[in-house]
Amino acid sequence: MRFIAIQTDPVWHDVVANRQRISRRIDELDAQPGDYLVLPEMCETAWTTDITALSLAENSVDWFSSIARARGVWLQAGFGERRGGGKFSNSAMVIGPDGTVKSIYRKNFLFPSERDCFEAGTELCVIDIGVAKICPLVCYDLRFPELWRIAARAGAEVFTVSSAWPIVRHQHWRTLLVARAIENQACVIAANRCGRDPSNEYAGGSVAINALGLRLDEADPCERDITLAFDRAELDGWRAKFGALRDIRSSLLGNMIITQV
């Protein structure tokens, strides 16, 4: 079973064009039933705080569910999720191979420019997909190691990250992802976007990292796919050999709602 990050260059505020592109990219993959596909943050619209643009993607969950079901794959997609009171959440849906929604994770840590538009999440999701327990996260969450640590203590073995991380801080992206893998003795598969929008340029850099913090595959600034072949023996062996997770003081972490699926 493989995790595949799909690095895209979305068309600004064009849901129809982006869905066509996503569908084509998935069709071109050598994806097998049961593989776990990860798309970037707000992959249908590109990252935006424009309410009109976000509202164009009203049936996002239904559309991605049909894609996952038709291909028999797990699918994680970043999207702007409409909430009450006229606000949205910057969310990542996780759809099972049968097309059912397993979880919707809402980005806990909002970037300053997001706070007038989006409502922050308050929970983590740890999802058992059979071969591993995964934890979906979104972009800026990468800078907050306590979030990852709490998820690891709750059983997360693979972190799946949907992102729109700009090129100006690309070295932070590369360094922090490796650090999060090392700290939590967990694999990381991260899908970032590439290209440009009116606000930013993006370097891509979607990446697969093993539990020892080694980059196994990394994208350049163009549309391509990154694959992580999950190795259960390697992960379990490393955690057994080097017991850092067992030495964590849970009392230092605080409490958080964790949805186990």
Image (cartoon, rainbow, N blue to C red):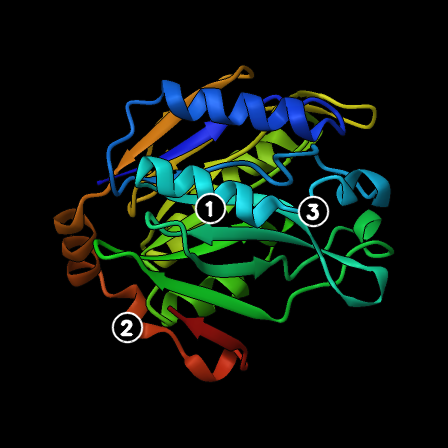
Picture quarter containing residue 35? top left
Element marked by disc 1: helix
Instruction: Say whether residue 128 is left or right of residue 231.
Output: right
Residue 53 occupies quadrant: top right
Q: Which residue is drawn at 85% across and 41% down?
A: 52
**Dot 1 surroundings within 10 Å: few (below 14), some, or many (20 or more)?**
many
Q: Where is residue 37 in the image (x, y as percent from the top left)?
A: 39, 38
User: What residue sits 37% from the left and 62% below the top?
Assistant: 127
- Distance Cα–Cα, label 2 vs label 1: 38 Å
Circle 2 sits on which residue? 246
Q: Which of marks 3 and 2 is nearer the N terminus?
A: 3
Please tell me how crowded label 3 is: few (under 14), some (14-19), or many (20+) other residues with Cα within 10 Å: few
Q: How far apart are marks 3 and 2 (CA)?
A: 44 Å
Q: Which of 90 and 17 is in front in this view?
A: 17
- Quadrant of the frame with the N terminus: top left
The mark lying in front, picked from 3 and 2, is 3
Please, what is the three-letter code of the amino acid marked with disc 3?
Glu
Residue at the far bottom in the pictured view = 251
Give the vertical position of 152 relative to 252 (above or below). Answer: above
Residue 188, percent from left and from top: 39, 44
Residue to which mark 3 is pinned: 58
- In this rendered view, identify the residue nearer to me: 145 or 30: 30
SS assignment at label 3: loop
- Discs 3, 2 touching: Cβ within 8 Å: no
